[in-house]
Amino acid sequence: MTTVNERTIAEELRRMAGEAVPVNAAAYAARAAARSARRRLSWSLAALATLVAGLGFVLPLDEASTTAKVAAPPAPGLPANTAGQLRLVRDCMPAGGPSVNVNPDWRDPAHGTVRDFRVLAEYRDKNGVSALVGSVKGFVLCTPSSESPEPPVFTYWGNQAPGRLTGFPGQLSVDVYAVHYWYRKSAAPHDNYVRVVAGRVAPGVRRVTIGWSSGRRTDAVVNGGFFIARTLAAIVTSKSPNSGEPTRHVDSPPVTVTAYDAAGRVAGRHEGVRFGWRGPGSATAQ
């Protein structure tokens, strides 16, 4: 039986009251206590953030390609969330802040609380949303789900403390490539996963595309110097190297990320970005 951390809930409710954002306290407590034993795959990595509140675009999740989304130049500062964006941050971090790892109750005060995080870019489609939320120190990749939500794992910018939001080399920084679970009623078995890629771009970049596999490409949402995109993750069957028995797993091949300037010229490209990448020292590119 799951035990609700009453002190954590009480502190967070006081914090919410101070910010005058309407919240369903019972639902909030339930989310903070929720743990699902049914989850068979836990693919959780840190998410990415941007300098300015995100612009939302409705994009079809299962189309092979999308119309290019041309972004405005980055805006300075780290503005406050709107009421809706704050709710999204709280949905992402129901315990009041990010977690150190996949245990959502293991927190480090140095990583901050929900007050420090902003919604910086969102990729919305008919099935939901994945959001890049972050602070000046680091980021969390968030895919809200009514069941088995992904833990809000924190990653420093550049995957190294104290985190450096700006000053990355080149015009393009791919900061995370993850697989997230999302709940869908009456979904086919194991058909509840999305592949998500997010990162940062230099001021001159206006468009970013993700090459998920041969011949298939998606335009990312680019906003204020950051980008995010997602697509359905296929479930494949292969033989176990140990038993030789067939096993099913999420297919997550490497991706290619390309950035373009306002004239449509290639400003930067990262090829062979592997699943699990979240900065130097995490995973390697081909």
Image (spheres, rainbow, N blue to C red):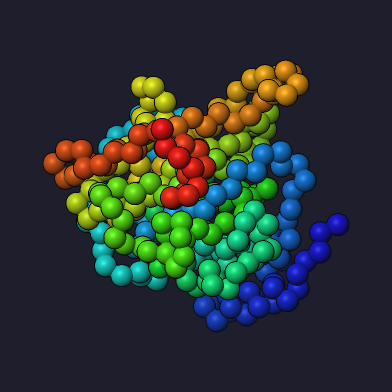
Q: Residue at x 25, y 59 (%)?
A: 74
Residue 61 spot, x, y in % from top left: 46, 34
Q: Is residue 34 left or right of residue 61?
A: right
Residue 228 spot, x, y in % from top left: 40, 46
Give the farthest residue toward the left. Answer: 263
Q: Is residue 15 above or below residue 144?
A: below
Front-most of residues 159 and 266: 159
Residue 251 spot, x, y in % from top left: 55, 29
Q: In the figure, residue 264 lies in which quadrant?
A: top left
Q: In the figure, residue 286 lies in which quadrant?
A: top left
Q: Is residue 78 left or right of residue 159?
A: left
Q: Is residue 111 visible?
A: yes
Front-most of residues 283 and 83: 283
Q: Is residue 257 above or below residue 132?
A: above
Front-most of residues 51 and 57: 51
Give the farthest residue toward the right. Answer: 1
Q: Is residue 139 visible?
A: no
Front-most of residues 255 and 2: 255
Q: Is residue 244 left or right of residue 71?
A: right
